[in-house]
Amino acid sequence: MIYCRLSEGRKLSEIKPDGGHDFLALTADIVSAHVAHNSVGINDLPVLIGSVHAALAGLGSSAAEEPVELKPAVPVKSSIKPDYIVCLEDGVKLKMLKRHLMAHHGLTPEAYRARWNLPANYPMVSPNYSAARSALAVSIGLGRKKPSDNPVETAASSSAARLKTPGAPPVKRPAPRSSGRRKLGIFTKDD
């Protein structure tokens, strides 16, 4: 619903999309409000009235239009190549599609998949780029399990294995920790 409030404080005119409204009265209200606050030439007044009436008449018909069938720039099957992915919206070849979709089309990956009826596992990154990033992550140590936090347990398990192995060198036990204060070796005149 669209409301038009006039400056004279008259009641609100209401536009309903169901067709139960008076376009002439609404047009007169809008044009009179515009002319009251703006200078409009006499020759421009019929053009203004016609454009306002056409705009009001077009409000209800825009919802009745049938959606246009979307056609991708390239076939979906050929949009995924080893080195790039082709955007179905405009046919651009990219390594990563997510940023392009938001910047140029205002779409999230989920909205893009829904718009083109793509499966949920449709990639947003080219396969070779994904493999290169995965190899880089593994090479710097990502994805590995952390070493055990308790080194005593690992030493105990390895020493138990050495005891079972004949001819293994003897295991040295770590020195017990002292619980007293540590002296820094700083001497004063009183010492």
Image (cartoon, rainbow, N blue to C red):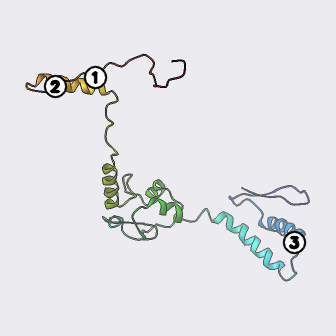
Query: Height in image: 50 above or below 184?
Result: below
The disc labelled 1 sits on which kind of residue?
A: Pro
C-beta proximity under 8 Å, tags 3 and 1: no
Question: Toward which corner of the image does residue 177 lie, by quadrant?
Answer: top left
Q: Nearer the viewer, mark 2 or mark 3?
A: 2
Q: Nearer the viewer, mark 1 or mark 2?
A: 1
Image x and y of residue 181, in percent: 45, 18
Residue 50 sits above or below residue 63 on the image: below
Residue 38 is marked as: 3
- Going by the numbered disc 2, the residue's amino acid type is Ala
**Amino acid beneath label 3:** Asn
Q: Earlier in the sequence, mark 3 or mark 1?
A: 3
Instruction: Classify 167 as above or below 124.
Output: above
Residue lying farthest right?
Answer: 8
Query: Toward the viewer: 11 or 33?
Result: 33
Left or right of residue 172, residue 37 in this image:
right
Can you tell which mark lies on residue 174? 1
